[in-house]
Image (cartoon, grey):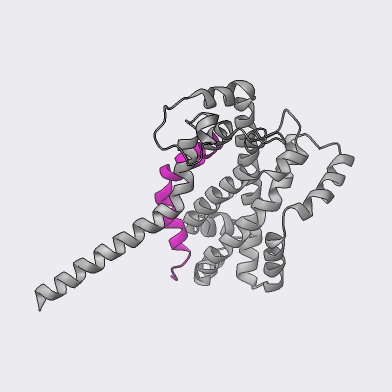
């Protein structure tokens, strides 16, 4: 009997690994194809059927860096994403705490609706407002537009973390004479540190990948990295080698960041689902 059970367990493990491999291949294939295409010439990328064996070239990466202010775009992306994430945490954490503790469902639904709204619906009002304030083409205007993406994300992630903290912690702090601000900064924030890390990472990635606002609200000096991909699209055709090389360079920093802090990200996301 034990041998039969072991055989069944081995078969289940094999089936599970095969299914897991299929799912991973399905999701990883576009990324792998992007990287492979970035080392092909335009002729190889346009070939039908696709060329599997080819002579790799780094000319696409050379063209991307030399023909575009790529270092400036990289700096702009980091600058905007860091400040958009920081402001989203500063404003979003108190709001998430307020919603969680006082059960403000209507406010939570309003924030959820703002998160569900397509970004283009904010674009025209933002452009009109910032044009009058002379903030179009500035880092300040671009950061504030990114808040429409980052702020609701932080609030909705952190609501669950604050709800998981028992009220007894706050009551004990108040009995010891702590003020509301002291309780928030010295009791609540350390307890939701995993969520803080997770929301910060996900918000940074969301801001990093935001494309539409950078095209409309930024000028040549403040455009971010996703615009570098857009520059390889034209009515005459698509430079697939340059396009995939630029996309690879844009994806690389976020991918490295995710790999370096994956432990904190996973622990933070699982922490929010555990009731204390």
Left or right of 269? Residue 238 is right
Query: Which region is colored magenta?
Result: 249-276
Q: What residue is shown at x 71% (from left), y 52% (from top)?
A: 148
Q: Position of residue 146 (x, y in %)?
A: 69, 46
Q: Where is residue 174 in the image (x, y as percent from the top left)?
A: 57, 66
Q: In which quarter of the image is residue 157?
A: bottom right
Q: What residue is shown at x 75% (from left), y 52% (from top)?
A: 120
Residue 268 magenta-drawn? Answer: yes
Q: Which residue lies furthest to the bottom in this view?
A: 1
Q: Residue furthest top?
A: 66
Q: What residue is shown at x 61% (from left), y 44% (from top)?
A: 209
In depth, the one of 242 and 171 nearer the eye is 242
Q: Can residue 32 be seen in this view?
A: yes
Q: Where is residue 107 in the image (x, y as percent from the top left)?
A: 71, 68
In depth, the one of 53 and 105 nearer the eye is 53
Left or right of 260? Residue 165 is right
Q: What residue is shown at x 44% (from left), y 48% (from top)?
A: 29
Q: Main secondary structure of the magenta part?
A: helix
Question: Looking at the rendering, in which quadrant would you find the C terminus?
Answer: bottom left
Residue 250 magenta-drawn? Answer: yes
Q: Where is residue 61 in the image (x, y as percent from the top left)?
A: 53, 26
Q: Which residue lies furthest to the front in this view?
A: 48
Q: Can residue 176 be seen in this view?
A: no
Residue 23, compared with residue 201, is above or below; it is below
Residue 14, compared with residue 52, is above or below; it is below
Left or right of 32? Residue 1 is left
Residue 173, compared with residue 46, is above or below; it is below
In depth, the one of 73 and 140 nearer the eye is 73
Question: Looking at the rendering, in which quadrant would you find the N terminus?
Answer: bottom left
């Amino acid at each position: 009997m034990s041998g039969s059970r072991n055989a069944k367990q081995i078969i289940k493990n094999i089936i599970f690994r095969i299914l897991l491999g299929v799912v991973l291949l399905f999701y990883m294939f576009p990324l792998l194809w992007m990287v492979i295409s970035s080392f092909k010439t335009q002729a190889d990328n346009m070939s039908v059927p696709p060329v599997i064996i080819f002579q790799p070239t780094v000319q696409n990466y050379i063209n991307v860096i030399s023909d575009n202010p790529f270092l400036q775009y990289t700096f702009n992306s980091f600058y905007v994403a860091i400040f958009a994430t920081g402001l989203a945490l500063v404003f979003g954490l108190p709001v998430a705490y307020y919603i969680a503790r006082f059960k403000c469902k209507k406010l939570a639904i309003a924030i959820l609706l703002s998160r569900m709204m397509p970004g283009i619906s904010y674009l025209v009002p933002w452009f009109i407002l910032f044009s009058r304030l002379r903030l179009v083409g500035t880092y300040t205007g671009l950061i504030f537009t990114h808040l429409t993406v980052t702020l609701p994300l932080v609030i909705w992630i952190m609501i669950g973390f604050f709800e998981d903290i028992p009220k007894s912690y706050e009551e004990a702090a108040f009995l010891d004479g702590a003020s509301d601000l002291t309780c928030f900064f010295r009791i609540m924030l350390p307890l939701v540190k995993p969520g803080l890390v997770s929301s910060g990472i996900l918000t940074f990635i969301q801001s990093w990948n935001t494309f539409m606002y950078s095209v409309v609200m930024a000028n040549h000096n403040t455009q971010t990295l996703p615009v570098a991909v857009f520059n390889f699209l034209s009515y005459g055709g698509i430079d697939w080698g340059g396009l995939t090389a630029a996309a690879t360079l844009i994806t690389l920093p976020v991918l490295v960041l995710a790999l370096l802090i994956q432990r904190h990200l996973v622990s933070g996301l699982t922490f929010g689902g555990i009731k204390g």
